[in-house]
Amino acid sequence: MINFRNTRFLKSCPSNRNLPLDDAAEIAFSGRSNVGKSSVLNSLTNQKKLAKSSGVPGKTREINLFTVNEKCRLVDLPGYGFAKVSKKEQERWGQEMTRYIAERTNLKGVIIIMDMRHPLTELDRAMISLVRDSGKAFAFLLNKSDKLGTNDRVKTIKKVEKELIAMNLPAIIIPYSAEKKNGVDELAKLLSGWIEG
């Protein structure tokens, strides 16, 4: 299994034109602006400040790349659904993410992060459609699982599974807590399989 603990920041790209050569496998992390993408990346890599986390949703406004090793990179995509930026800027982000997911040949898979308390919003469904149409691998990470009790977690997972099956989608679901580091090993195993498979 890949060791993600040596991951380091590579660069921020305001557009696809600025991306590095497609000479390393990439795994992208996407999700609404307030689902904790930065915290997920930090927990996966066991680093507190690798990805900049903020109390202000929408801080990630560029495509941020992190080098795991010479063969692999992690990619933090701009959060979607943040209303406090201009419509023009939201559209630009949407175009850049669409192009990245659809055209990036070395993109091995996308982790779609959702708040376990509010999964499968309309914006999540739009991202799911985009990734599905791209033909890339994808999985669902239900973050903030520690905010729910055991019964509610089980109910939510079953509900999401049922909806994904109804949408004819692979129901790869990882309950996750960046704060408690629950699900880290399962996520690392999945990503390793995508990269090495």
Image (cartoon, rainbow, N blue to C red):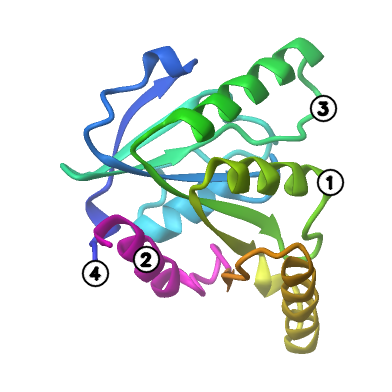
Residue shown at 24% from the left, 60% from the top = 196
Residue shown at 41% from the left, 31% from the top = 104
Residue shown at 57% from the left, 21% from the top = 96
The foreground one among 184 and 135 is 135
- Can residue 175 be seen by looking at this rendering? no
Q: Mark 1, mark 2: which one is toward the viewer? A: 1
CA gap, disc 4 to disc 1? 34 Å
CA gap, disc 2 to disc 3? 32 Å
Question: Residue 79: horizontal and vertical position, in percent?
Answer: 64, 36
Q: Is the Cβ of the residue at disc 1 closer than 8 Å to that at disc 2? A: no
Instruction: Find disc 4 in the rendering and name its residue.
Output: 1
For residue 4, side relative to residue 153 (left or right): left
Q: Amino acid at mark 2?
A: Ala
CA gap, disc 1 to disc 3? 14 Å
In this view, 112 is above or below 148? above
Q: Earlier in the sequence, mark 1 or mark 3?
A: 3
Disc 4: CA contacts within 10 A as few (<14), some (14-19) or many (>=20): few
Say the numbered circle drawn on residue 188.
2
Q: Quadrant of residue 195?
A: bottom left
Q: Amino acid at mark 4?
A: Met
Q: Amino acid at mark 3?
A: Ala
Residue shown at 28% from the left, 62% from the top = 197
Q: Earlier in the sequence, mark 1 or mark 2?
A: 1
Q: Earlier in the sequence, mark 2 or mark 3?
A: 3
CA gap, disc 4 to disc 2? 7 Å
Q: Please provide the residue range marked out in magenta.
A: 177-197
Q: Is the Cβ of the residue at disc 4 closer than 8 Å to that at disc 2? A: yes
Instruction: Find disc 1 in the rendering and name its residue.
Output: 122
Q: Earlier in the sequence, mark 3 or mark 4?
A: 4
Q: Earlier in the sequence, mark 4 or mark 1?
A: 4
